[in-house]
């Protein structure tokens, strides 16, 4: 009987330890996600600035960096894999999809030398990013 009680206490202690580890890691995950979001916004702003200076190369470079940061953010907390595609149910995923589409368009337009169209697409991506951060 004593062995059974000892095992129960050990199991309970292991469970408490796991919960504490999870709680300690949670703020780090939230911080990492916020950090990636800030980096995405920063790169998008740099892409806009480059475009306004007629640097299509800068638009491509900064937009690609923003894309990589958004991918990292999604690795930390994925939104882009919608299981039930019902409009409005997964706002963050819908904004992510729009952000990626606008960034792809910006890169394509910049590579074709259409600076203003590229800047417009980056600006739309930036709007979707802000809307994503404000959505549920």
Image (tube, rainbow, N blue to C red):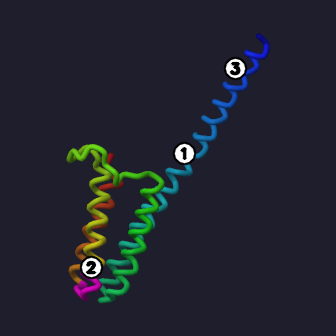
Quadrant where the image shows the C terminus: top left
Which callout, 3 or 1, points to the residue nearer the camera? 3
Q: What stretch of residues is rendered in magenta?
A: 109-115
In the depicted view, which residue is nearer to us: 66 or 130?
Answer: 66
Report the disc number at residue 108: 2
Report the disc number at residue 8: 3
Whether tag 2 and tag 3 are in contact, CB under 8 A, the answer is: no
In the rendered view, tell whether residue 11 sits above or below residue 127: above
Q: CA distance from mark 2 to mark 3?
A: 61 Å
- Binning the other alpha carbons within 10 Å of mark 2 as few (below 14), some (14 to 19) or many (20 upward) gives some
The mark nearer the N terminus, 2 or 1, is 1
Q: Residue lying furthest right in this view?
A: 2
Please state the horizontal and vertical placement of residue 120, each as a whole percent of the image: 23, 75
Instruction: Check residue 114 for magenta coloring.
Output: yes
Report the disc number at residue 92: none
Number of numbered tags placed on the structure image = 3
In the rendered view, tell whether residue 74 sits above or below residue 121: above
């Amino acid at each position: 009987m004593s062995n059974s009680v000892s095992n129960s206490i050990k199991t309970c202690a292991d469970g408490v330890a796991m919960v504490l580890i999870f709680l300690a890691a949670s703020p780090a995950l939230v911080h990492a996600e916020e950090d990636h979001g800030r980096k995405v916004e920063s790169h998008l702003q740099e892409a806009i600035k480059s475009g306004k200076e007629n640097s299509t190369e800068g638009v491509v470079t900064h937009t690609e960096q923003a894309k990589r940061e958004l991918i990292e953010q999604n690795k930390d907390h994925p939104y882009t894999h919608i299981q039930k595609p019902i409009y409005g149910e997964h706002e963050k995923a819908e904004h992510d999809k729009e952000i990626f589409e606008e960034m792809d368009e910006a890169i394509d337009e910049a590579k074709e030398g259409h600076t203003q169209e590229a800047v417009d697409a980056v600006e739309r991506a930036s709007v979707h990013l802000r809307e994503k951060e404000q959505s549920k």
